[in-house]
Image: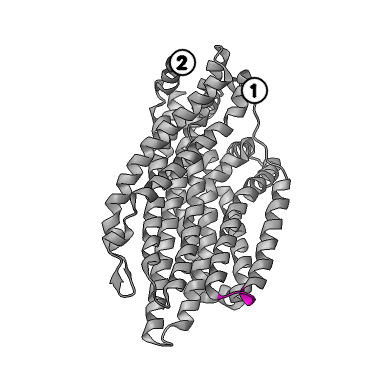
Amino acid sequence: MNPHVLRLLLRPTPGQNAVLALPIVAFALVTTLVLTVVGGAQSFWSWTDDMAGLYQALAAIALVLLVVPLAGLGGAAARLSARRRDERLSTLRLLGVTPAGVGIATVVESLLVAGIGAVVGVLGSVALSPLIGLIPFRGEPLGLTSVLLPPLTVIAVVAGILLIAAGSAALGLRRVAISPLGVRMRSTVSTVHWFRAVIAVAVLVLAFVLITVFPSIAGLTTTIVVLAGLFAAALAVLNVLGPWVLKITATRQLRRAERPERLLAARTVLDSPKAAWRQVSGISMASFMAVFAGTGVSLLSLMDGEGSSQDATLIADIRTGLIITLVGSFLMVAASVGVNQAAAILDERELHRSLHDLGVPLETVDAARRRAIMSPLLITAIGSALCAAALVLPLLGIALITAPISLITIAAVVAIGVGVVWTTTRITRPLLARSFQAA
């Protein structure tokens, strides 16, 4: 491939530096969180006593509940600069660059951006390691040496993140290689099919059946490991179902829209349900986690004060694990929502230019943007909580799910998650104002 083509692709254009910086920031956050989570979990695998298996199995569940959403955030980071890249790649195709040249340029650019972010993330995880080492389990801190990952594990995590970046870039090539002019004219329409709902329901029903049957035929540790896999599948299937649900909801809202901001909000969601889902997918994960946290707190409150000192230590450690998992989930919500909102504003500059030319005021555009984000939140939060409750029901029963302390915990976690999303809509408003003024 001609190196001049790659330099042309990587060279920032005026006003586009933020578009290039956002994926770097996102990859840095993903790398830092993944390495920190894995580093904390690995300390449990050095234990060999009778309780070690239970601790390791619980750590596996927490790891799944955190790493699966992080993988989704990594995929979103790889797509942040997609609009900018599509325009440049379509220009290269119109200038006669071969599809192979375009492919190499795309993958190399994505790898460079992800690589810079990953290096920053590795440094961030090293800086956080002393704090993670202070977290107490079994009555004493984990220790710095136990949470520091070996170099090969760090390399494997970074390689996985780079693979996600390269894969997302390669998948995005289909539109450019087939029809460069179509990409330039933005004629590609984002669609979601009803078959997503069929797949999602089938997976959730299968998970419910397995959770109901498996604990009676396997040991505790094996059951927990299998449950971790089923929870991971449920989290993944929510990402399949979510865009279709938002599409159906937005279609109904469009029919009832009576104000400009309501019309614009519904059209924004329908223009790309997948992008709209990425804006609120963090809440889906937080709501899913809230049910587990609520039932866990309710269960621990029943166990507290009973049994030996070893049981009391286990209960205290589970509480610590719940707090860590929730803190990690909120960090992911903040990172995912903030970065996706900023990216959406930058990617919609052409729309802002058109609205500005039509005389639409900034206040209306901002209200439409906030409605396009906040309106799907209720459906997302309730739907994810119901899916989690359906999976927990065979294990703990309806009494623990509907217990007052459980409901209070679930409501508090969801409220904090919604508050994080609402705050990011306010924080990113100046970026929208600059984008609107530039138009």
What residue sits 44% from the left and 44% below the top?
338
Q: SS of the residue at dot 1? A: helix
Q: CA distance from mark 2 to mark 1?
A: 21 Å
Q: Pinpoint residue 110: horizontal percent, then vertical percent.
A: 46, 32
Say few, some or many: other residues with alpha carbon within 10 Å of mark 1 (under 14 / 14 to 19 / 20 or more): few
What residue sits 58% from the left and 34% below the top?
171
In this picture, which residue range is highlighted in magenta? 215-219
Foreground pick, 75 / 163 = 163
Foreground pick, 262 / 209 = 209
Name which residue type carries label 1.
Ile
* Rendered position, 139 above or below 90: below
Residue 2 tag number: 2
- Can residue 320 be spotted in the picture? yes
* Rendered position, 57 above or below 241: below
Foreground pick, 413 / 81 = 81
Which residue is the site of mark 1? 178
